[in-house]
Amino acid sequence: MPFIQVTIAEGREAEKKERLIYELTETVSTVLGAPKEAIRVLITEVPTTHWGIAGQSISKRKEESI
């Protein structure tokens, strides 16, 4: 049973996450030949204050780009 874990920064629309789950499932099914019913996808959303890039949180980087 393929299990896919995806970690993303919070803030994306539910529709985009649904599409991500669908597309990942389709791709894994095609590539591995696994039945879709056996594929699991877990999306973990991380607060932008907890995700750092180049020494700053995503939140801080967004504030400074405004």
Image (cartoon, rainbow, N blue to C red):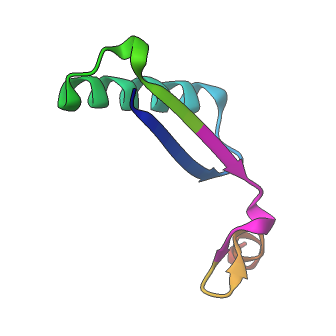
Task: Residue 16: give x, y in percent of width and height.
Answer: 55, 32
Asked if residue 45 lies in the magenta stretch, the reply is yes
Horizontally, residue 5 falls left or right of residue 49, namely left
Q: Nearer the viewer, residue 53 or 60?
A: 53
Q: Residue furthest bottom?
A: 55
Q: Quarter holding the N terminus? A: top left
Q: Residue furthest front?
A: 1
Q: Quarter holding the C terminus? A: bottom right
Asked if residue 44 lies in the magenta stretch, the reply is yes
Q: Magenta residues, as a range? A: 43-52
Q: Nearer the viewer, residue 32 or 19?
A: 32
- The residue located at (65%, 34%) in the rendering is 13
Q: Looking at the picture, does residue 52 appear above or below residue 55? A: above
Task: Residue 64: give x, y in percent of width and height.
Answer: 74, 79
Horizontally, residue 52 falls left or right of residue 16, namely right
- The residue located at (71%, 82%) in the rendering is 56
